[in-house]
Image (cartoon, grey):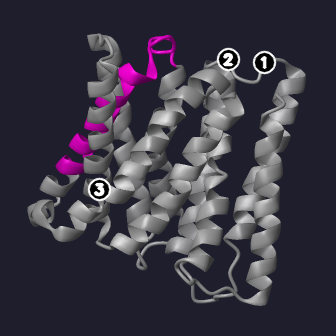
Amino acid sequence: MNILIALIPAIGWGIFPLIASKTGGNPSNQILGTGLGATLVGLLVFIFTKPAMDMQSFIIAFIAGALWTIGQLGQFVSMRPERMGVTTTMPISTGLQLVGNSIIGMLFLGDWKGVQAKTLGIIALAIVVLGVILTAKTDDRDGGTASVKDVLFLGVTTIGYWVYSSFPNLPQVKEVSPQSLFLPETLGILCGASLYVLFSKQAKEFSAKSTWLGMIPGAAWGIAAYAYIFSAQANGSTTAFIFTQLCVLISTIGGMVFLHEKKTATELKFTIAGLALIVIGSVMTGFI
């Protein structure tokens, strides 16, 4: 059952970029739409479950949600053509998240206890990272290049992802129900997205049609995020996060089928090999 729960975030976060691509808009529209859609899901969960809340867990979840926004915006900025571009950003970003979350889980949250578990976990992590690199392989020689400054910027903003992915397993909220954590988390995301839009002087995006359409993928993201809290508490932050990387399989195949993204014969071979490695590495963590 825990493995099935771990697959829900992978599915939701896998279809999220596909829906977001269809609804359109710029990064500000997308981050606002995600915040609004996720908060709507959070409100529905709160209304129907009526969870008890305490101030400490509310603040921790709110901060985690706001820091997730930093991670997502760092990714959006890095994807711009004048920075690293999409094909360079995504494998670096995913690799930074995997390595960071695994280190945090092993060193501070008690994941992968024992030498055997740690060895198997590190091997699984290496397989997943290799798979992600292969899926990002391209024949385009004009793609973005990564400077030290760009990689450092992406690395610093990725800290937001690390906190978000690890917070459900913190001792202060480990025993708190996911229903109690979810609404403050989504409110933190909405607050972080709103502050970004306001401070970047893009207030007009609040009323943009593409922002409100962005609530659709935002809701999909919200459902996946709700399931992730259950998964992180049941499976541990490290294993739960690695399972979410199966979303690469869904978004990659979906991009080719539904978004009609083209790949050369060489790129397709690398993609299939990479997806196979991601599945193998993720399944391995289920036996730790």
Residue at 52% over, 60% down: 15
Label 1, label 2: how many angstroms apart (C-alpha)? 6 Å
Q: Which residue is identified by label 3? A: 215
Q: Secondary structure at mark 1?
A: loop
Residue at 53% over, 35% down: 228
Residue at 51% over, 18% down: 170
Q: Which residue is identified by label 2? A: 110
- The residue under label 3 is which amino acid type? Met
Measured as percent of width and height from the top left, residue 259 is found at 52, 79
Label 3, label 1: how many angstroms apart (C-alpha)? 40 Å
Measured as percent of width and height from the top left, residue 239 is found at 69, 33
Q: Secondary structure at mark 2?
A: loop
Q: Nearer the viewer, mark 2 or mark 3?
A: 3
Give, as a single range, the part of the protein colored magenta. 170-195
Label 2, label 3: how many angstroms apart (C-alpha)? 36 Å
Mark 3, other Cα within 10 Å: few <14 / some 14–19 / many ≥20 = many
Q: Which residue is identified by label 1? A: 113
